[in-house]
Image: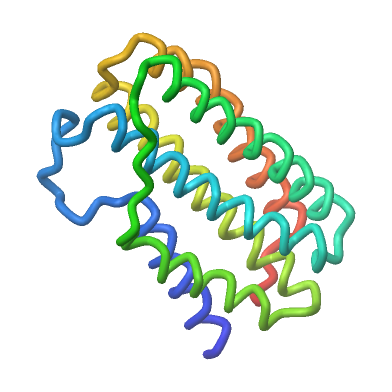
Amino acid sequence: MKGASMISALSLASLALTGSASPHRTSTSVDDADIIARFEEMVSADVSCAQLAVERAHGTNVKNFASMLVREHGMARQMARDVAAQINVRFKPNADNPRAAEHEKVLKDLRQRDDIAFDVLFIRHEVEYHKALVNLINKEWMPAAQSPDLQAFFGQVGPAIEAHMKMADAIQQSLGPRRP
């Protein structure tokens, strides 16, 4: 039962990452600064989860995947900041980030695991996180981006994030039907 509640919590956290509080949200409801801020928030949150996995993961494949995420998501964050400077958009982090509490819940759940269940929980989160991020990029941010440079940025990082999703899915498959 405890494992089921953690799975539910991670599923809710993944839904919260999508920022889909309103089902009627349109692509015109965000501007380039909002898009960059939301991307930064999501990628930063995932970097902190991946850093924890670098320290606590048991499987070499999970640890290597986490290391890659720290490195590549770090580069993507810097690229987003560079695009913001290039298009003269002031980066505006959201001080009232509604996803921050959900991210903390995910980290707390991960910190409570110190066995193979950590790997299973982390990878399950990564699959859901990357699916949500790919969806945001393709269905909300790319269509809403006003700057061709921001669109080009997503054209560059989108396939990499999709590749991360596929890698996480493959690792999840290799871990089998284990439940944390």
Q: Position of residue 27 (x, y in %)?
A: 19, 30
With respect to residue 31, does 133 lie above or below? below
Residue farthest toward the right in the current orientation of the protein: 60
Q: Position of residue 80 (x, y in %)?
A: 50, 28
Identify which residue, 58 or 67, lies in the foreground.
Answer: 67
Residue at the spot 56% in from the left edge and 35% down from the top edge:
77
In the shown orientation, is residue 156 left or right of residue 141?
A: right
In the shown orientation, is residue 22 left or right of residue 12?
A: left
Residue at the spot 25% in from the left edge and 17% down from the top edge:
146
Q: Position of residue 127 (x, y in %)?
A: 56, 50
Residue at the spot 36% in from the left edge and 37% down from the top edge:
136
Q: Quadrant of residue 170?
A: top right
With respect to residue 116, does 21 lie above or below? above
Residue at the spot 67% in from the left edge and 77% down from the top edge:
111
Q: Quadrant of the C terminus?
A: bottom right
In the shown orientation, is residue 141 left or right of residue 79?
A: left
Q: Quadrant of residue 119?
A: bottom right
